[in-house]
Image (cartoon, coloured by chain):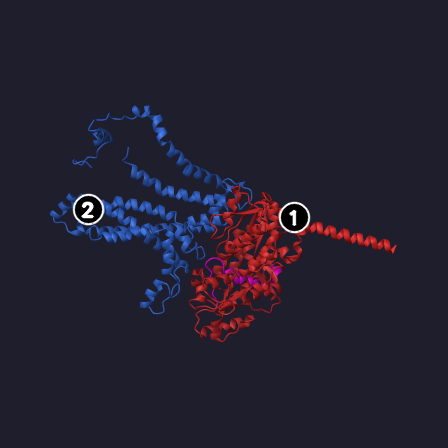
Chain colours: A red, B blue
Amino acid sequence: MSKFKGVCGRRALLSGLATAALLTMGGAALAQEVSGELVILQWQGGTDLEMWHEVEAKFTELNPGVTVREFQPAGGQGDPRAGIRTVLLGGEVVDIIINTWPAFRVELNNAGILRPVEEQWASFGWDDKLSQSWKDLGAIDGVPYGVTYTYGDRSAIWYKTAQLEKAGVTPPTSWGEFLASFDALKAAGYSYPVVIPAKYWAHGEWFETLLLRTAGVETAAQLARHEIPWTDPKVRGAMVKFKEMLDAGCCANPATMLATEDPYPSVFRAEEGNYLLMGMWSNAALKKDYGLEEGVDYSIFQFPALGMGFDDTTSVDTKELVVTSNGNNPAAADAFLDFIIGPDAANIMGKYGYASPSTAFDTSLLGPVQQTAVAAVAEAKVQFVLGDLLPGDLVDEYRIQLQRFLQDPSEDMIDTVLAAIEAKAATAY
Amino acid sequence: MTSSGAKPTADAFADISSPLTGGRREPVVRRGQKGLRDAPAAWLLIAPVIVLFGISVIYPLIDTIRLSLFDIKGLAPAKFVGLGNYAALFADATFRNTLLTTLIFTLGTTLISVSLGWTLAMLCSFAPRHTLPFRGMFFVTFGISEAVSGYMWINILRPDKAGLLNSLIGSVVPGFQHSWLGDPVTALWSLIFVASWSGVGLPLMLCFAAVQGIPKTVLEAAYMDGAKPMSIMRHIMVPLSMPGVRVAIFINLLGALRAFDIIYVMTGGGPVRATETVGYFMYRESMTQFKLGYGAAATVVLLVAVLVVSIPAIIQRTAGAK
């Protein structure tokens, strides 16, 4: 019996090994078998594009039967969504779309353009590479559509190290320290400690992280879905904190904020301001355009703690790949999705200073600033940038109303502004 | 004008012997005679123009009007809403505000650029040769793309110490600093000034040409009669320069109504929509929000405004033509 059992066990083991070997070979063979043209709708520029081309080159090197054709929509320098829509409405067939707006993913899906990747997630074993939270971030009603391949911390405050040293300020960790540092920085000769480029959208960054820190990710998610009104006391609470910062003399006069589009010169060239709440693309800009050394000339600190029970929250942005339902080469598209979260692509991204959410990613490739951001995001409850979650109509009104608030940061104006956003939200969903 | 001062008729022109015909008298083409016999050939010759005009003007125009009757948001299927977009448009406080902004911008730029251009033309006409480089420099501004001049003026109007205008004023008023494009009041007037600056060259040239077209005999007669320069300007040059002024007003009104580039580059319609004209609103709704139907309705409203301005001018310009 035991002998029989042993034979059975050996046979089972052998057959199991053989099956595994076959599957592995089959998988490898499958990976090598993808061929044909893969069309990617991509709209990036600058360093993002350089990185992307290297990623594509690596993919075609590993899959010599595949040729990649990029389709670049017109008008890609600003918001490329109009260009993407035009391309798709014009009947262009692509296999993969690069996306960074969750609301746009929903729009694409509602139009029947997207193909869910639930089966691929299981068959390729992407759970081993991406955690559940990243999977959720790319899902619609629990079904995964987007595969996140890079992300950025949007609750990091950038500063020039020499300025804080000159003013005798250490990177503030609490809200009180942060507000108190304004006087020290002004005394050191800086005109306005916080630079808010409010010409288009960046003034929303402060409100969004303040909302997370005063009311948490759930409230922010509910607001994005309009499950709570903009006039909710929790939303108002974030605005009150914003007002507190303005009242403390954080910033330049409203007209200067509203005319400022590019904030970097104020901090890193003109030495007028000190703190900048901006996305991780700043890293490439400061290194490349300003010739500064990461972690030496400039650094970041995470948004100061407000002590309201939600200091473990962080705003993030991501880039994801979504696959189309009418693409001509779904096999190659799936293979590319698998590749983008694999070690080869992740490490190319790391070389360019972009963080990958993949477990295969070697974070030691990143510079000190990016490592700080990656660690902060890893420890935090994350919420996608609010502005990219709102319907287009509403996000426009939201930013305009925040501009009105910057012009007159009074209690009455907070109510006026929130009521105006709520009125628009009532018709926007 | 003929030497007798009477306007020549079309028939008179038809009877003139052309040097190209070797002095032979060509038979007069009467309406309804030879013209009809040549109709197929004439249609054939103008067919390419008609086809191009149809493709590039008529079809987009009809399609824009068609789109304006649909509710199209992003990639969602279009829904027919009839005149719903127009009703929504005029109920939209933002759009009504853009109408007012467009009116201020259009009248402001037309008034400044035409009056400045006309004044400069009058002054230049006293010394045409000596003012040639000066006129050339002014006209160059008309040739600079609005995007380029926009970026140039952004730097002149910068809110910080690096802004040229603030530096100049600061040299007289120490400590002066103003954010010209960040203050809703000065942002619109800054745009009007910049648009007028780039638009002044055309009225200058048109008015100058009109003044130069005044027969020398008229001016000489006035001098001989003892008229003083101011009288000559008031009674001869000003009235006779009016055709140039009318064309300049017409062109400036149309340009200002459709203004987009300079607003896009300099203010993006801000701050707080203070500089958003109908042209920019149309772009924002159609291209940023991708509300194609709503944006098309705004386009049609703008088209109507342009027609309201153009038709009287076209009628007036073509009144004497047969």
| Residue at (34, 55) in percent of width and height | B193
Q: Which mark is residue B151?
A: none
Decide: is A354 above or below B20: below
Q: Main secondary structure of the magenta part?
A: helix
Q: Is residue A177 left or right of residue B178?
A: right
Residue B237 at x, y percent in the picture = 21, 47
Residue B158 at x, y percent in the picture = 39, 62
To the question of a shared chain for discs 1 and 2, the answer is: no
Decide: is B139 above or below A299: above
Give the residue pinned by disc 1.
Answer: A29
> Magenta stretch?
A194-219
| Residue at (36, 60) in percent of width and height | B156
Give the residue pinned by disc 2.
Answer: B236
Labels 1 and 2 touching (C-beta < 8 A):
no
Q: CA distance from mark 1 to mark 2?
A: 92 Å
Q: Is residue A217 magenta?
A: yes
| Number of disc labels | 2
